[in-house]
Image: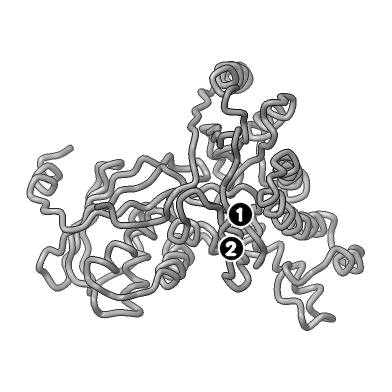
């Protein structure tokens, strides 16, 4: 830490502390921007924000402990940066300034315990934590859903990722020991008890992040829109893949490339899997829940083509183990984590074995953490 940073931290007088969690998604990947269904929850790993109003009209200072970097900006002159992490901050500020004039000069210290690129949505946690904190600090009285939506817009406009609403929604709206069945078409949602006993939620981080991730994410979105443009010409009710049934898609199979057909087929089937998985969780049928997770991964691997050899290796490795009832890639793809439902008595025996196998296969260290469904973005007393 430089002298300038030390001085900033030592003179900081915290008025407000906010914690903003990462999220996991059990099933429903790449469905949110297709107006589909998802089944996420916040986790117990988070970003911690400390805030103070600094008395100025427009001067702002944000210090990232993780990056050991300082961002200084003026509210009267906001524009995108060439530094990626800064755009998550600046994008949120830009969106807030469009809907309120209540934001004034502030100082903020950001400390993250979320792994970047692991698919646990550190980006949404950063956006939502900042928006939530400034809403509290300056008494802006914005409802939670407004914070969710402006954080999503910030990622669209300043970061350039055309994400759906799931990550921000889960980061803000989650409740302890619950999962959210979220309809991304209209934001209707239902909380379901996260009763996975005797299984635990194990994340295995490939520690790879193939540079395809952001470009291919937007490409998949464009491919889905291309399918819609073909089908909607003769079906006015079709606005997204949510409105397309398997039988309707099959009518257009000859007018679509096999690639585009596969993309749409995956989304339609994944929406069905989410609804079935939510029913399984409510009934306590964890075996079928886990089976649907495996099927989700195979769809992401073969039809949607957003997996990679490291993720596939981990899912294949788990599928041969009767103590792991479900596993799939999680997040945008091309790296990041697999999410696994593993018997709690088997974790200590499994981890050394899978880490050794992964190291031998890829010469990369596999990292792991157990996580639990947790409260969304909130004030830390």
| Residue sitting farthest toward the front | 283
Left or right of 64 on screen, residue 284: right
Which one is closest to the eye, mark 1 or mark 2? 2
Residue at mark 2: 190
Measured as percent of width and height from the top left, residue 38 is found at 62, 57
Report the residue at 63% width, 41% height from top.
Answer: 329
Of 21 and 379, nearer the camera is 379
Mark 1–mark 2 Cα distance, whole angstroms, equals: 10 Å
> Which residue matches tag 1?
39
The one of 312 and 288 positioned closer to us in this rendering: 288
Would residue 338 be found to the left or right of residue 67 on screen?
Answer: right
Q: Which residue is drawn at 53% across and 47% down?
A: 24
Image coordinates of residue 270 in percent, x first then y, are 73, 54
- Decide: is 221 above or below 325: below
Residue 266, x across and y down, in percent: 76, 54
Please tell me whether residue 320 is drawn above or below residue 328 in the rendered image.
above
Residue 206 visible at all? yes
Q: Tell me, yes or no, if residue 363 can be seen here.
A: no
| Residue found 44% across the figure and 66% down from its top | 148
Q: Which residue is drawn at 44% across and 60% down?
A: 159
Q: Within the image, what quadrant is residue 259 found in?
A: bottom right
First in sequence, mark 1 or 2: give its number.
1
Badge 2, how many Cα within 10 Å: few under 14, some, many 20+? few
Badge 1 element: loop
């Amino acid at each position: 830490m430089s002298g300038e940073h030390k001085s900033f931290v030592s003179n900081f007088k915290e008025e407000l502390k906010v914690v903003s969690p990462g999220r996991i998604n059990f099933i429903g990947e790449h469905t949110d921007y297709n107006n589909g269904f998802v089944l996420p929850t916040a986790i117990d790993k988070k970003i911690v924000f400390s805030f103070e109003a600094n008395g100025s009209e427009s001067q702002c200072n944000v210090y990232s402990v993780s990056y050991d970097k300082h961002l200084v900006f003026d509210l009267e002159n906001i524009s995108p940066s060439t530094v990626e992490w800064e755009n998550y901050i600046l994008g949120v500020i830009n969106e807030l300034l469009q809907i309120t004039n209540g934001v004034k000069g502030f100082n903020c210290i950001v400390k993250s315990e979320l792994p970047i690129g692991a698919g646990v949505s550190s980006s949404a946690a950063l956006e939502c934590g900042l928006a939530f904190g400034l809403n509290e600090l300056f008494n802006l009285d914005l409802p939670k859903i407004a914070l969710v939506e402006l954080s999503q817009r910030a990622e669209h406009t300043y970061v350039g990722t055309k994400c759906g609403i799931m990550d921000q929604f889960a980061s803000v709206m989650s409740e302890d020991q619950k999962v959210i069945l979220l309809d991304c078409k209209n934001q209707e949602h239902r909380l379901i008890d996260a009763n996975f006993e005797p299984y635990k939620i194990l994340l295995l981080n490939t520690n790879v992040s193939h540079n395809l991730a952001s470009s291919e994410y937007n490409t998949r979105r464009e491919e889905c829109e291309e399918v819609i443009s073909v089908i909607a010409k003769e079906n006015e009710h079709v606005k997204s893949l949510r409105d397309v049934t398997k039988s309707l898609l099959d009518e257009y199979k000859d007018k679509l490339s096999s690639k585009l057909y596969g993309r749409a087929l995956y989304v339609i089937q994944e929406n069905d899997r989410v609804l079935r998985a939510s029913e399984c969780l409510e009934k306590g049928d964890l075996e079928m829940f886990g089976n649907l997770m495996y099927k989700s991964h195979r769809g992401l691997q073969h039809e949607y083509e957003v997996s990679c050899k490291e993720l596939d290796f981990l899912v294949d490795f788990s599928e041969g183990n009767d103590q792991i009832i479900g596993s799939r890639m999680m997040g945008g793809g091309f790296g990041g984590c697999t999410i696994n439902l593993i018997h709690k008595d088997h974790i200590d025996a499994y981890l050394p074995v899978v880490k050794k196998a992964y190291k031998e296969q890829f010469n990369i260290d596999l990292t792991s953490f157990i996580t639990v469904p947790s409260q969304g973005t909130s004030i830390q007393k």
